[in-house]
Amino acid sequence: MGPLHGLKIVELEGLGPAPFCGMLLADMGAEVISITRKSSAAERATKISERGKLSIALNLKSAEGVAAVLKLIASADALIEGFRPGVAERLGLGPDVCLARNPKLVYGRMTGWGQTGPLAHTAGHDINYIALSSALNAIGRAGEKPVPPLNLVADFGGGSLFLALGVVSAIYEASRSGKGQVIDAAMVEGAALLMQMAYGFLAEGAWQDQRGVNGLDGGTHYYDTYETADGKYVALGAIEPQFYQLFLEKAGLDKAVFSEQNDPRQWPILKEQIAEVMRTKTRAEWCEIMEGSDACFAPVLSMREAPEHPHNKARGSFVTLENVLQPSPAPRFSRTPSKIQHTPHKAGSDTIKVLTDIGYSASEIEQLQQQGVIS
């Protein structure tokens, strides 16, 4: 059983970050019940964020649908939602109503801009949130435009992970105080917090407030990607002097020429010399030379290649379920391991089971079906 076994989480189904948060909690053993506003017979096997969850379909625009949610949260530890500010309140499911029903409830809210502020009610996506947090400006090549790092930084790093941390922290606190609370998880703030190291360097005068000219943004020759003879790429991160020296040795580079590791004036010249050497061998040949050493080297693998790497295979870092390749649960627990409870259920397929579990009779469920509250 996972470390969160015994917890009950209700998720008002949304997009992206909130469902991923629910998936993380489900992987760790929590019972996560996802409430969708529309049932569907379609398979959702490729919707990885729904793995491990129960799915019920309720018409939340009906008083009966809202009443069912309130009955459900009466025995829940937390509720998570990813609507714009005010939407849950308009549905009759805002924090005040829910906490009145269950004073110990943790109410987790996931938004891009936060529940308050001038931009709180405006639309946005990951690229907008990391733009405002300064993260986007720091990603890209010198003299070129910023590069969107997929939607990893704000949606999932600054959003889902911080919401999950907030939820389990508040549940822990509620176990002692008996009181719930509201978690305001804003992706823009999570993304800003992920920039803490760069801000520390900036305060020390060790970081220039422009992209592509610093130690960790591809500005140096020892922290960058390089093309190989077969058109593939490798990643180098030889920051520490001893690792840097080992890389130079394995690459056959002149240590005297590369002695001024941290002289920014030398970086462009040294980078071109490394690039020239890297192009003399294939990626596989460089892996044979570098992998398994402290040279801080790795092949740049595609989504199809990564699951086949020996290290990832040895640890079971990826798994295929119902023909869907996906990452395995993380992190790992020695005594209460996480696991994928089951593949995604069809939307709404657990409605009758969940309603029965919270006390609805067969006749009451039939009446809800006739009223169009459930499908």
Image (cartoon, helix red, strand yellow):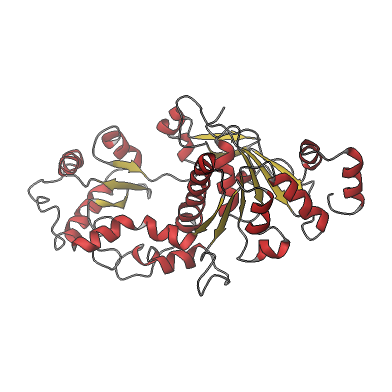
The residue located at (37%, 50%) in the rendering is 231
| Residue 13 visible in image | no
Answer with the quarter of the image where residue 84 lies: bottom right
Residue that protrudes farthest toward the front in the picture? 177
Q: Position of residue 178 (x, y in %)?
A: 56, 43
Q: Position of residue 356 (x, y in %)?
A: 81, 37
Q: Position of residue 310 (x, y in %)?
A: 41, 30
The residue located at (60%, 66%) in the rendering is 85
Answer with the quarter of the image where residue 59 lies: bottom right
Left or right for 62, reference 43: right
Foreground residue, 150 or 119? 119
Left or right for 342, reference 59: left
Q: Is residue 202 above or below residue 99?
A: below
Q: Position of residue 326 (x, y in %)?
A: 55, 40
Q: Is residue 321 above or below residue 36?
A: above
Foreground residue, 100 or 68? 100
Q: Is residue 355 above or below residue 111?
A: above
Residue that protrudes farthest toward the bottom in the picture? 118
Question: Where is the N terminus found, in terms of image quarters?
Answer: top right
Foreground residue, 360 or 1? 360
Left or right for 217, reference 100: left
| Residue 315 visible in image | yes
Foreground residue, 181 or 347? 181
Residue that protrudes farthest toward the top in the picture? 335
The residue located at (42%, 59%) in the rendering is 191
The residue located at (56%, 41%) in the rendering is 25
